[in-house]
Image (cartoon, helix red, strand yellow):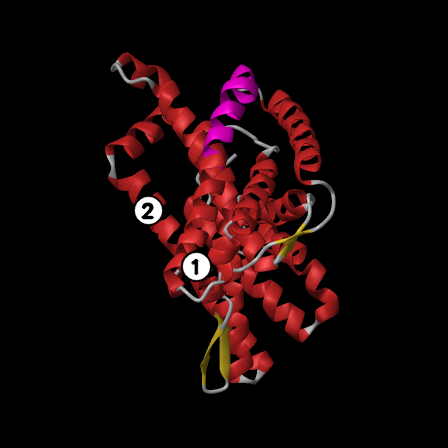
Amino acid sequence: MNAISTTISRLGGVTLLPVALAALAFVLIGQPSSWVTLTVAGLAMGMMIFLMASGLSLIFGLMDVLNFGHSAFVSFGAFVAASVLAALGSWVTGGSAALNALALLAAIGAATAFGAVGGWFFERVIVKPVYRDHLRQILITMGALIVAEQLILAVWGGAPVAVPRPAFLAGSIVIGDVAVETYRIFAFALGLGVYLVMHYALNRTRIGLLIRAGVENREMVEALGFRIDRLFVAVFMAGSALAAMGGAMWAGYQGLITPAIGPEMMILVFIVVIIGGLGSIEGSLLGAILVGLLANYVAFLAPKLSLASNMLLMMAILLWRPYGLKPAIKG
């Protein structure tokens, strides 16, 4: 294992793993057009999972909170976005690209805003009393998740809900023999944009510095006159908003959602966070891309193994690097 780690480090580190996976898939698939389509689909899928996983990683990495109710925000984001798109039906299906874009922005914005407000309530009422107690955090957030799932059933019912896709994102871009869905390109661009904003905010701004300093030594930051509790509330709201945004994007990707969308996606979210390393935004991005690419490649090459591919990937990486690919917290 040490020899493998040394070789990979010399070649560019773990950030080259998606490139290596894509190169191997190119050899195995043998058809360039199919490989490009699957690769773009995998990148788009990975970016949507990253939106959900980054929120969980952000909350744990900066606040040391194990939020097992995170999937509730994914579900609420998906259903809020679906409701907004249904209400703006004429804008969604009309021939005006501007109205299509406004409907999409309204849906994503409403889901994100709902996630932020819900995150504020969740942190103030449920999480705040159990800071620094991981066992109680798990129990109380699981209980809150059950309540949230029942609220979704009460409001939207248990039947599947159709999610209309804006007309300007419903088609595909065809270049030669390669066809790529426009929605997947948009999903990839949105995920990449969110990552760049998060990376800049946490590493290049004063607020990011204060948040990271507060995690290391809360008492010292408070002694300097800063209200660290307000910063942590903002972090929780941001993480919940990202989960809701990811849920909204995934709803448009699937086209049909059920109340089980949150718990179903939470399995992939936890796999991504574990693969990437606890508390690491960069690790979550890397893990999400690996999961997205592998899921699409395996579904094409060996469909019967597609359901197990993510678990096998997690097992292999943890055997190689027990703390994940780019952990912010070790031990």
Where is residue 327 shown, x and y percent of the image? 47, 43
Mark 2 neighbour density, 10 Å: few (under 14) some (14–19) many (20 or more): few
The answer to whether residue 31 is above or below residue 295 is below
Which residue is most to the bottom? 176
Of the numbered discs 1 and 2, the one sitting upstream in the chain is 1
The residue identified by callout 2 is 197
State the residue in front, 331 or 252. 252
Q: Give the label on residue 100, or none.
A: 1
Left or right: 165 in relation to 257: left
Residue at 68% from the left image edge and 26% from the top image edge: 143
Q: Position of residue 37 (x, y in %)?
A: 52, 75
In this picture, residue 144 sits left or right of residue 37: right
Q: Nearer the viewer, mark 1 or mark 2?
A: 1
Tag count: 2
Q: Nearer the viewer, residue 226 or 177?
A: 177
Which range is magenta? 115-131
Identify the amino acid type marked 1: Asn
Is disc 1 surrounded by few (<14), some (14 to 19) or many (20+) residues within 10 Å?
many
Tell which of 128 and 189 is nearer to you.
189
Magenta stretch: includes residue 161: no
User: Is any part of residue 307 visible from this angle?
Assistant: yes
Secondary structure of the magenta portion, mostly?
helix
Residue that protrudes farthest toward the front in the picture: 90
